[in-house]
Image: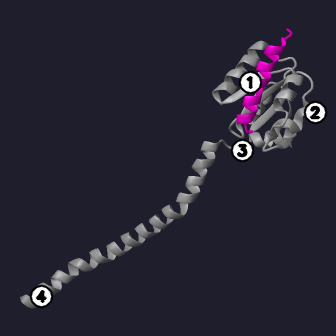
Amino acid sequence: MSLNRSEKEAVISEVTSLAAKAQTLVMAEYRGITVANMDKLRVTARSNGVSLSVLKNTLARRAVAGSAFDVVADQMTGPLIYGFSEDAVAAAKVVAEFAKTNDKLVIRAGVTGGKVLDIDGVKQLASIPSKEVLLAQLCGLLMSPISRTAVVLGALAAKKGEGVAEEAPAAPAAEEAPAA
């Protein structure tokens, strides 16, 4: 289906705004994927905050021109699906997870932070835990010394408390002896 000039401009402006907000772009070849599988991929992507688009490559090149994603413009050939995400790992994670279960989806390249990622780079990016998990791990690391200190202090207090409890009954008995 051919787009007229105004429709092409609308697509370019939409993708340009996606690229302006996004931290990561992942490109994958989707040749041979069934419509049902493509729908599953889109649903998964949408639920993870990833915008997936099948675009004409010339329109995609024009849309990313001048952005951090311009570095992969020369690799925009063939039937590609473009995944943009504001989260640095979300697009890579969605595409890589789907590619594990569907061999028809072939990761071609990615970009994050203005750096081109090859297939292995996209897979490594996908293996990074999500932001929420990383924050939880960081909190755990920060809390670890504090909780260890609290445990040690609690053990010392309990040990000292046991010694005080043993000495306390002995003191009144000594007071009663002189009075008798």
Can you name the residue that lies furthest to the top here? 1
Mark 2 or 3, nearer chain start: 2
Question: Is label 2 or label 3 in front?
Answer: 2
CA gap between label 4 and label 1 equals: 94 Å
Residues at badges 1 and 3 in contact (C-beta under 8 Å)? Answer: no
Residue bearing mark 1: 14
Element type where label 1 sits in the image: helix
Relative image position of residue 7 (x, y in whole percent): 79, 14
Q: At 89% across and 23% down in the image, what residue appears?
A: 58
Question: Is label 4 or label 2 in front?
Answer: 2
**Observer able to see residue 12:** yes
- Amino acid type, mark 1: Glu
43 or 172, nearer to the observer = 43
Q: At 85% across and 33% down in the image, what residue appears?
A: 65
Relative image position of residue 173 (x, y in whole percent): 16, 82
The part of the image, by quadrant, that contains residue 155 is: bottom left
Element type where label 2 sits in the image: helix
Q: Is residue 157 magenta?
A: no
Q: In which quarter of the image is the N terminus?
A: top right
Query: Which numbered tag is attached to residue 128?
Result: 3
Label 4: few (<14), some (14–19) or many (≥20) C-alpha neighbours in 10 Å: few
Relative image position of residue 135 (x, y in whole percent): 60, 48
Mark 4 or 3, nearer chain start: 3
Residue bearing mark 4: 177
Label 1: few (<14), some (14–19) or many (≥20) C-alpha neighbours in 10 Å: few
Residue bearing mark 2: 74
Colour logic? one colour
**Observer able to see residue 94:** no
Element type where label 4 sits in the image: helix
Q: In which quarter of the image is the C terminus?
A: bottom left
Can you name the residue that lies furthest to the left here? 180
